Amino acid sequence: MIITRATEYSIRAALYLASRYPDPVVSKQEICDAEDITPAFLTKILQPLIHRGLVRSKRGVAGGFSLARDPANLTLLDVMDAVEEPLLLNVCLMDSTVCERECTCPVHKLWAEVKDKMEEVFARQSLAELARSRTNGTGCA
C-alpha cells in the first residue's frame, strides 16, 4: 500500500490548518507557501475535505480555508477517509463479496488484522496533537 501524493498533501494541509486553529481563515497562498503545494493542487485536494465537513472555504479577497471542526476531534484517519484513501494490503479486503477465498485463505485474516492496526494507528492522535509536535520540533530526533 502506498499513500497517494494527494492524500499526503491533504494531510499536510490539514495539519497546517490545525496549527493555525482557531484562526477563522488561512489564505490559500499561505498554505501553499508553507507546505510547498501549488494553488491548483491545493484547491483540488481540499475539495473532498470540504465535502466531508472537515474544512471550510471562504471565497473572496479575504478568503481562504479553515478547519470546520476542532482539530482535537480530528485524526489522520478522518482525513484519509475523507479523501477515500483505502487502507488495504489486498483487494480482497475491499468488501466481503470480492474475496471468494476468505474462508479458506490463511493470509486473509492477517491482512484484515494489519488493516485494523493501521486504522488504529492513524486514529491514535488528533490533528491538534500532531500539529503541536510539529511546531514544538519534536518530530525529528
Image (cartoon, grey):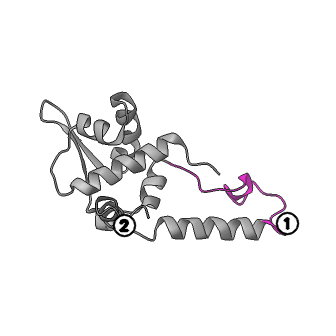
- Given residues 29 and 119, the one toward you in this image is 29
Residue drawn where x is 75% and y is 70% of the image:
109
Where residue 69 appears, x then y in whole percent?
26, 59
Residue topped by disc 1: 105
**In the figure, residue 47 lies in which quadrant?**
top left
Residue drawn where x is 36% and y is 67% of the image:
126
| Residue numbers of the magenta segment | 84-107
Residue drawn where x is 43% and y is 59% of the image:
76
Q: Which quadrant of the figure contains the C terminus?
A: bottom left
Main secondary structure type of the part rendered in magenta:
loop
State whether residue 43 appears in this view.
yes
Residue topped by disc 2: 126
Does the magenta-highlighted stretch encompass residue 44? no
Looking at the image, is 61 positioned above or below residue 80? above
**In the figure, residue 72 lies in which quadrant?**
bottom left
The tag earlier along the polypeptide, 1 or 2, is: 1
State whether residue 53 appears in this view.
no
Residue sitting at the far front: 141
**Amino acid identity at mark 1:** Cys
Does the magenta-highlighted stretch encompass residue 101? yes
Instruction: Identify the secondary structure beneath mark 1.
Output: loop
Give left or right: position of 29 versus 15. left
**Amino acid identity at mark 2:** Ser
